[in-house]
Amino acid sequence: MKECTVRECTIIKDKLTDLKEYKVADKFKDLKNEQKIEMLKRMFHIRYFEMEVEQFILKGQIYGTCHLYIGEEANAVGAMNAIRKNDWIVSHHRGHGHCIAKEADLNLMMAELIGKGNGYCKGKGGSMHIADMNTYNLGANGIVGGGMGVAAGAALTNKLQKNDGVVIGFIGDASTNTGVFHESLNLAAVWNLPLIFYCENNQYGMSTPIIKSTKIKRISDRKAAYGVTGVTIDGNNIVDVYNTVYHFAQLCREGKGPVLIEALTYRQRGHSKHDSQVYRTKDEVEQWKEYDPIVRYREYLIESGVLSEEEAKKVEDKAIEDIKAAAAFAEASPYPELSELETDVYAE
Amino acid sequence: MREIDYRDAIKEACIEEMDRDPKVFLIGEDIGVYGGAFRAYSGLLEKYGPERVINTPISEQAILGGAIGAALTGYRPIAEIMFIDFCGLAMDQIVNQAAKIKYMTGDALNVPMVLRTQGGAGRGIAAQHSQSLEAWFYHVPGLKVVMPSTPYDVKGLLKTSIRDNNPVVFIEHKMIYLTKGPVPEEEYTIPLGVADIKREGKDVTIFAYSNMVLKALEAAEELAKEGIDCEVVDPRTLVPLDVETLVNSIKKTNKVVVVSEAAERGSVASDIIAIINDSAFDYLDAPVKRVCGLNAAIPYNSKLEQACIPHKESIVEAVKLIL
Ligand SMILES: Cc1ncc(C[n+]2csc(CCOP(=O)(O)OP(=O)(O)O)c2C)c(N)n1
Ligand SMILES: [Mg+2]
């Protein structure tokens, strides 16, 4: 895997935790080639899904706002492959990647994004509110930090039921400055809940660089305040993500949670639909693109002989085809009926 | 008179008050280089520097707590909460701290601050970014609540709110930032608690605030074509409320429709009707009609979203019902 170099604004090596210290084993190497290739396909799915969403934005079909995950794909795909299908996740406003990595239905997602009545939320939720019980996804959130307590609650269920399930709460770097971060991580810690807070440190919260809103160098250093394990990893390296999540999920299953994982990554697009990005330079974005998680993983798989150039191309083409099909499905889907307005306010 | 948009009127008010009083400062999320989520503060960081345009982490509770503390000790902060929906994260600061400190301490302390925020539907950002939550604040003694509908009003009322010695919840509407209107170059302020008659008429009173004033005016134009002459009363501030202007209008028209974008149940509109019942019952020739949002969350799909809130047609219909 192409190493990230030390430089300002890019993944700074001295921020990373030495995973050997935690005896994180290389479980990735034991995966079958098919699964390694499947992971590449999921990353392409996310990338091309988001690019298709950009087209819908241009066509004016995304009414409200949405937050793209381009550049962060290794996190969702690596993490989801390292847990079980029936482990819960809780997502946040930048949630499309989490859904796709959890194997949500691409058609229903795309339909939701353009407000169709057969979308995941019947056209009532849009980008920020997709949840899917079939894939154990407790949903995205429009409120920064809104899913943190929820994630702890789902982990409490696992504990009460004495099963060995684990919950991943995906959180943003900037969201760790909300009050609920403190309350839920502390609570999870005193109860030893099987919870991983997976913090996607994409360097910004909207326009504010994380270094301007947070004094400590590593967000994972907050582990000390809660008496939990915390590590900082290269979130654009899917192998590291996979191995780290696999390892700490195992600890959680043994009653040794919670864990705070900080993954250094980068959002390649604007914060949301409207963002002139005055707060960063083009140069910085270009530097990070050199460490694009998909490019790195693809090269790595080819170099290690898992698949050939042509095969990689086929995987990519298939992903593009799937996304085009989802877009066509969404376009052809019906809008919701007005009679839907006052349904779903209360449970039966 | 020159015309400027609502958003620039907000900025002008801040500039004038910051120039007049060095104790006024701005605090909130993404208000620095970004100029605020709706860009009301663009250029202000360059003009006043980071000590008076204070960009914060995502910490609503600390933003308002910080503003309250600074207000207690001599400053006049204007704290921005990006969406009124996010006030949920800081309700203790607003309801148990800001609103009550003066009373609880027997006037030992004052909280001269403005909580600037915006609400309302229309941008397709669904249930957690589109609510009209003014009733939450209206309900709490100790808070003033201001909801301007025009560039002229927003400027004059924001200046007064900044100078007010109480916590003022200043609620803008996301759909009117770019509407233009006449705003004098000369300095002016508008007192809190004085309604404005946005359109004179003799047949029916339409009481509306914030974005609903614009809808009410559209409805009044439509009804005028059919010879129905509506008077549109814009209270501009909900607390304090100018009951007198409303009652005087009802004395003239003897009929009133109350419009609010918020979900109907427990709404400010409901309370206005109680006030009309107390103060103007004898002048009424017809039951008061409410036109409000549905008792549902705001949906994403734009057709559904529009159907969830009042619009010109629903106001026209309500007026015709009581004629
Ligand atoms: C409570 C709350 N405050 C502010 C916002 C507005 N907002 C939405 S996303 C965001 C930045 C979040 O940053 P981070 O947690 O790092 O996630 P990222 O967007 O970088 O993925 C902000 C300020 C919000 N939605 N909710
Ligand atoms: Mg971030």
Image: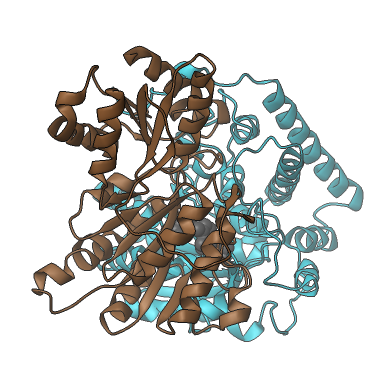
Location of residue B8 in the rendering, given as x and y in whole percent from the top left corner? 59, 60
- What chain is the brown one? B
Examine the image and state in which quarter residue A11 appears.
bottom right
Examine the image and state in which quarter residue A63 appears.
top right
Name the image quarter holding the C terminus of chain A.
top left
Which residue shows up at 28% across the image and 45% down it? Answer: B135
User: In the drawing, does residue A208 fall left or right of residue A216?
Assistant: right
Location of residue A322 in the rendering, given as x and y in whole percent from the top left corner? 75, 34
Location of residue B93 in the rendering, given as x and y in whole percent from the top left corner? 26, 66
User: In the drawing, does residue A150 fall left or right of residue A37?
Assistant: left
Let me know if residue A41 appears in the view: yes
Which residue shows up at 18% across the image and 36% down it? Answer: B275
Location of residue B12 in the rendering, given as x and y in whole percent from the top left corner? 55, 67
- What chain is the cyan one? A
User: In the drawing, does residue B141 fall left or right of residue B163?
Assistant: left
Q: Is residue A345 above or below residue B127?
A: above
Q: Toward the viewer: B159 or B228? A: B228
Name the image quarter holding the N terminus of chain A.
bottom right
Q: Is residue A236 above or below residue A95?
A: below
Q: Is residue A16 above or below residue B124?
A: below
Let me know if residue A256 appears in the view: no
User: In the drawing, does residue B263 fall left or right of residue B286?
Assistant: right
Q: Toward the viewer: A115 or B34? A: B34
Q: Is residue A285 above or below residue A89?
A: below
Which residue shows up at 80% across the image and 39% down it? Answer: A320
Q: Toward the viewer: A222 or B131? A: B131
